[in-house]
Amino acid sequence: MRQTDRHFKFDWATIILYFLLVGFGLINIISASQSGGSIELFSFNNPYSKQLLFIGLSVILIMLILAIDSKFYERFSSIIYFASLLSLVGLFIFGKNVNGATSWYGIGGMTFQPSEFAKAATALAVAKYVSDLNTDIKNLKDQLRIALIIIAPAFLILLQNDAGSTLVYGSFFFVLYREGLPKLYLSIAVFIVLISVATLKIGPIITVIIATILLFTFYFFRRKKMRLFQPIALTVICLGLAYGVQFFYKHILQPHQQDRISLWLRLEKDPNKLERMKKTFAYNLNESEKAITSGGFTGKGFLEGTRTTGKFVPEQHTDYIFSTVGEEWGFLGTMFTIILFILLLIRVLHLAELQKSQFSRVYGYSVASILFFHFMINIGMVMGLIPTIGIPLPFFSYGGSGLWGFTILLFIFIKLDSNRINEW
């Protein structure tokens, strides 16, 4: 193999999946933002023509990423990370407030959202620290340092009133678990989620009673491996956690946040209040569910979705773009989209496992985890399966910052993977 040929060896399956998602996303953005008349791709006075421009710039960005030596990303990961933190801090001075969140820089007539790029920067920093020879992920000190790397950008984003983007940083838990984080942390996370949901659904008293019965039943079956103080201690923790969740829900969360959780868990039984919810904060969700349902098996056809063309779902081309897929392309279109995402995730995970460098492997798992989190949350949100959280569907939702951020995230990994492909 000639030396010059080695630089063009990339995983084309991943690249093809990327362009299929971006292309199908653009088609649906055209539907969601078309206001009648002919489609004018190059007018740049509408979202879909701007998205086409963003895609063109993404291609240039891809070429730049793939042209840079792969060692650059590991060597300068710390500098990239701290530059990202500075860009987040700068928002508190120069940031532009949009829809109640100070998450954008205004540059001319365009906006720039640094939190979309902070994900890739954090993934590089986590991969760098975890792959360091002196790092032992089972050591508490190293665990705290890794947690600090993840929490720092998440906290800055939370201060900007962007809770959705903050939650994405929880996806790094799966990466650390793959690299050897003790199972105790996973058990604690599952335990907290179960107790929290049960408390809101059936109340703290019944939750603690059920938890106590289960804990002591488990103790009697595994008496040789457990001591009596363990189920007693866990019962006390359940009690504190249950009443803590109840207090947080009733006294800390804002009314609109309580309503979203109430709607998700079906806590509200008053039909009149439910109807008011659907006409106020849950309007987008209600219309999104109607649009998806109306699509049937094959959909109404491109530009034929009545709820989409009628603008029943506000800003449908952004976070609720999947409802366009459901209405115009039906069950077949939604399954096609989901299959594309699943294939991309499986491909990235497969390539991550093939990496000989721990840095590349950890970064690959970070890419898969972040994409999966966005994919799961966005589609679940649009279908009403989880509470409404404002995060975009990768490669699909309208927006330059989002598209470029996910493109950088994915193609840095493709470049890192090229080292494995290009070996003699």
Image: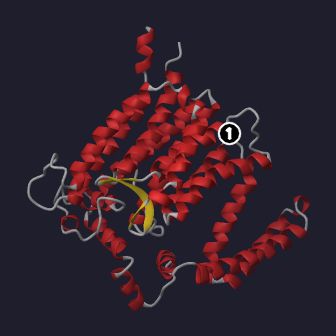
Whether residue 271 is visible to the viewer of this picture, yes or no, is: yes
Vertical arrangement, residue 181 with respect to residue 321, above or below? above
- Residue at image position (13%, 52%) is 39
Vertical arrangement, residue 41 with respect to residue 156, above or below? above
- Residue at image position (53%, 35%) is 350
Locate residue 338 relative to residue 144 in the image: left or right: left
Task: Rate crowding at label 1 as few (under 14), some (14 to 19) or many (20 or more) other CA atoms within 10 Å.
Answer: many
Locate residue 107 relative to residue 216 in the image: left or right: left
Which colour scheme appears in the figure? secondary structure
Q: Nearer the viewer, residue 420 or 34?
A: 34
- x and y, in percent, of residue 229 in the image: 90, 69
- Label 1 secondary element: helix
Q: Quadrant of residue 105?
A: bottom left
- x and y, in percent, of residue 121 in the image: 54, 43
Vertical arrangement, residue 407 with respect to residue 8, above or below? below
Q: What residue is disc 1 on?
A: 130
- x and y, in percent, of residue 75 in the image: 59, 30
Q: Nearer the viewer, residue 25 or 100?
A: 100
- Residue at image position (88%, 58%) is 225
Quadrant occupied by the N terminus: top left
Locate residue 44 relative to residue 262 in the image: left or right: left
Question: What's under tag 1, amino acid-wise?
Answer: Val
- x and y, in percent, of residue 29 in the image: 26, 54
Q: Quadrant of residue 155?
A: bottom right
Whether residue 392 is visible to the viewer of this picture, yes or no, is: no
- Residue at image position (64%, 32%) is 358
